Image (tube, grey):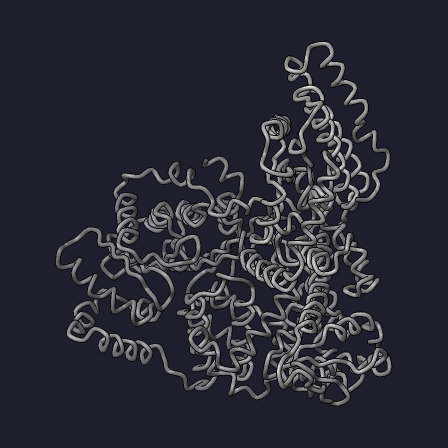
Amino acid sequence: MISIPNQRAVIDRRKLAADIAAAVADNGARKARPQVVELLRTALERGRSELARRLLEAPSAGHACVNGQAFLIDQLIRVMHDHVIADLYPAPNRSSGERLTLIAVGGYGRGEMAPHSDVDIAFITPGKNTPWCEQVIEALLYYMWDLGLKVGHSSRSLDEMVRMARQDLTIRTAILEGRYLWGDQALYDQTSRRFWGEVVPGSEARFVAEKLVERNERHKRMGDSRYVVEPNIKDGKGGLRDLQTLYWIGKYIHRVRSAAELVDVGLLTTREYRTFRRAENFLLAVRCHLHMITKRAEDRLTFDLQREVAARMQFAERTGKSAVERFMQYYFLQARHVGHLTGVFLAHIDEEMAGKKKARGLLASFRPRARSLKGYKVFGGKIAAPSDDWFQKDPARLIEVFQLAEEHRYEVHPETMRMAARDVKAIDAKVREDPRANALFLQILTGRNDPETVLRWMNEAGVFGRFVPDFGKVGAQMQFDMYHHYTVDEHTIRAIGLLAKIERGELKDDHPLSSEIIPQLASRRVLYIATLLHDIAKGRGGDHSVLGAEIALELCPRLGLREEETELVSWLVRYHLLMSATAFKRDLSDPKTIHDFVGEVQSLERLRQLLVLTVVDIRAVGPGIWNSWKRQLLSDLYELAEEQLRLGHKRRGRAERIAAKKQRVAEMLGSDAHFIDALDDRFDDAYWIAEPEDIIALNLPHYAKAKQLEDQLSIHAHYYPARGATLVTVIGDDHPGLFYRIAGAIHLAGGNIIDARIHTTRVGKAVDNFLVQDPLGKPFSEETQLARLKTAIEDALAGKIELVPQLAKRPLPRARAASFEVRPRVEFDNKASGRFTVIEVGARDRPALLNRLARALFENQVMINSAHITNYGERAVDTFYVTDLLGGKIVSPDRLRRIETALLRAASDQFAAEAA
């Protein structure tokens, strides 16, 4: 533990002990208890306040804060102990069994405590607990509980400690960090000797193995990435527990007494130890701020806390980056350093443990030789630099070693990783322009084995960002929203990994169209480079697509691409969001949508490249973002665009398309095919163009049955696996406001509408199709769920439910959305469709947003033809294809302004509050 400056300002133990003694002298030990508790509580509160003040003055001083907290608790417990054995349970002639030592264990044993961490104490006795020992322990615990401290405690004899430590990894780890706190010093010394003499010897390899299993399981629970955007400071990958694991292993094997001694035993270099301390100091400071803000043991750096911690730690805004994004970027850089340290440290331990295993029998004297590969040493599946100055002599080797690792499926030796991280500054402008170095980098990026893993190694060693400086600028950069789950660099590397898996045919079930298309590409390296560059300009304060396209024009020639390849990469980066925006926010049944999209794409090669880039970009955003609905929409857009590009002016006309669709529907209906002719006078051409064949094949029998029974209202709900959603069809008399009432009912039943098409037959019947998912993006498939949907719609249309107050009571599925500022916006487009005005509304995702927007349109006498709903975390984008009451586009500026005002009010936080 480091020394605490001005200790008495934190706690004056002598004065506190004197005040307690005075209270006891005046009232007696028993009656003075309330005064004693109050004196202890006051000391605790004053000490915490002083440490909080110091942290605000030096907001990054993590070690000082946690050491100060441990010092404060130490002094309080020592005063309590002395008061208990002197005043409450004095035993002047104690037997040899009436001895007690207090050992601080776990993080407290290291002398590190966040403000609301548990106080972990082991009470050790020589043998079986005596009544005196039990009384003292109980009295101490009650005092600590009275102070509101959360105490993790154990009470064991010496023999029990040895036996249980041998059996239980958690106990062994706790005792490993044991520190004498107070009580019988000789008993503590005996405890320490027995632990190191009877528990540790011979169990080193098992301890390391168990610790690594424990670490891996913890990482899986926390998301298995150090780049998740709401990290757990303590238990997440790259967090404090990873650093502590290094220390535990080093201490268990080499008996080091501090992290600094890891250098002495060769497990860390001096430079790495400085990195260790810097990362630990920062992470401890963040943890202390979290505890102080929340007033509890909070270790998760959630969105709502990130802003406040960033402000407390004095991070400022810069061009293109908010203060919170700069703070989180620094956090992720530290997490990356932790990852690098962990990798080299554990690899060294692995080799060290393997070296201790003695071979037996005939092979005892056999030692396999390292083979040579282009001057590198290869041994045990690892590639290593042959000398300490290897990279300094030829910095291009910093790229080469990773290229060889990817090509031959090797790991990079930990010592070589250390050398790479140390020598990375040797990569300068000359190396970046070196054709050989660029060719090697391109081989890694487009590698056939595992480019994702190798690029991640390069990134953590600092080589990637040094060789491609624009990539270095997005290193560890987060986007402060609920949509992106990873930092920009991690998202990009994951996208490249997904691309490689699709190319290897490993994801055919998830991405059948992309798997089919990739072999048809004229240039696979164009796709890999476009994937690398698609987000490379984020955080620069402008449109990252436009800025990224400019970077591509500069970088691609350096990497050896031809002029036409460079232009294609630049185009892909510029328009990498075009296909998803068109598929998810536009009506694909509208010919103008496809015409405009094809007008921008212009070639089959661009279309193919763009589809695969779009797929890996969405899939790499995070778990739960990709689904079969998005896959189907992208496939539909691709096929419609491909047809138009292939056939050009010869593409099939409207009549031919409808005839072909009717033929396919007839095949699907089989014996019910007669419904097509029987209902031909009901459904116009727009219906046949807009709806997929399989939905028409469901709609027609339902409509025919409703007609036969003369039903005023017919509701059907089916699980629709093709889109990963539930299809809800409502057939009934059309009337104004039908859409917003159905939307409200579906939300009340727990559903989110992701797509909607509204049709009115020639005889005034509504046929409305809705695709619905639950708040987690899953379909409703159980009968009870489907029945609930139908009942809610029936009740809403029958006027049995007051929609506005009921919807206002529904909580937002993700209340964390309130942590983000999302300004509502409304955009009108009268060029995107030949028949409709397209209205796009962006707003904070909240309960019944679609219902409120649809109601606002209804109240402004706007007819909705279709609605397309897209969510980006905390942000929703709802697109409506609309007309006026006469079926024409809305073009009057005054009318558009009134509609915009109504929609902005419906989308605003203030309106939501008023409705509630």
Q: Position of residue 96 (x, y in %)?
A: 67, 33
Left/right of residue 736 with respect to residue 527 in the rendered view: left
Q: Position of residue 267 (x, y in %)?
A: 76, 64
Viewer-proximal residue, 608 or 812?
812
Viewer-proximal residue, 568 or 117?
117
| Position of 499 relative to 684 (above/below) | below
Viewer-proximal residue, 418 or 2?
2
Q: Residue at x 49, y 50 (%)?
A: 895
Left/right of residue 473 with respect to residue 300 in the rendered view: right
Q: Residue at x 61, y 38 (%)?
A: 127
Q: Quadrant of residue 148?
A: top right
Viewer-proximal residue, 802 or 333?
333
Q: Position of residue 737 (x, y in %)?
A: 34, 47
Q: Position of residue 842 (x, y in %)?
A: 53, 53
Q: Residue at the left extreme? A: 708
| Position of 494 relative to 361 (above/below) | above
Left/right of residue 162 with respect to residue 459 in the rendered view: left
